[in-house]
Image: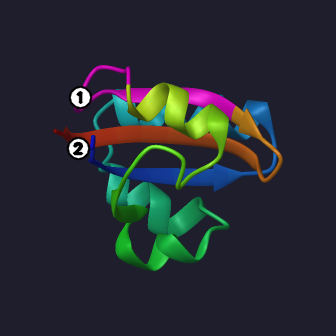
Amino acid sequence: MAKATARHILVDSNEKCEALKAEIEGGRDFAEVARENSSCPSSRQGGDLGSFGPGQMVREFDEVVFSGELNKVHGPVKTQFGYHLLEITSRS
């Protein structure tokens, strides 16, 4: 079964998500931005979600994590929780 590790940032608006993505693409550290801005409890670990398989996260998340390019910031991805930036750190 496929496994992936990823980290994310959860915010309440598309605009905030886009602004944070621009900061990261401009050189800011993803983990630092997550700690300062994400409303998810994973923010304490820099947004790290650990390892998970297909179906363990919401569908919109899975679609990106199991098909997107590694080590690139993806998003905004809208789910019922809000807007996410995702970085896939590994996949097997």
Q: The residue under label 2 is which amino acid type?
A: Thr
Crowdedness of circle 1 by 10 Å Cα count: few (<14), some, many (20+)? some
Image coordinates of residue 78 in percent, x first then y, are: 74, 34
Q: Residue at x 37, y 75 (%)?
A: 45
User: Which element carries disc 2, helix, strand or loop?
Assistant: strand
Q: Tell me the quarter of the picture where residue 72 sits.
A: top left
Give left or right: position of 17 versus 51: right
Q: Residue at x 76, y 32 (%)?
A: 14
* Label 1 close to label 2 by CB (< 8 Å): yes
Residue 71 covered by magenta stretch? yes
Q: The residue under label 1 is which amino acid type?
A: Leu
Give left or right: position of 46 versus 34: left
What residue does disc 1 label? 70
Query: Can you say which quadrant of the picture contains the C terminus?
Result: top left
Q: Tell me the quarter of the picture where residue 39 sits.
A: bottom right
Of the two numbered discs 1 and 2 on the same chain, state the one appearing first in sequence: 1
Q: Which residues are magenta?
A: 67-77
In this view, 23 is above or below 29:
above
Q: Residue at x 64, y 37 (%)?
A: 59
Image coordinates of residue 89 in percent, x first then y, are: 23, 44
What residue does disc 2 label? 89
Q: CA distance from mark 1 to mark 2?
A: 6 Å
In this view, 60 is above or below 45:
above
Give left or right: position of 67 versus 86: left
Give left or right: position of 73 versus 89: right
Q: Is residue 22 visible to us here?
A: no
Coloring scheme of the render? rainbow
Crowdedness of circle 2 by 10 Å Cα count: few (<14), some, many (20+)? some
Q: Is residue 44 visible to us here?
A: yes
Q: Residue at x 63, y 29 (%)?
A: 76
Front residue (pair 18, 50): 50
Front residue (pair 1, 70): 1
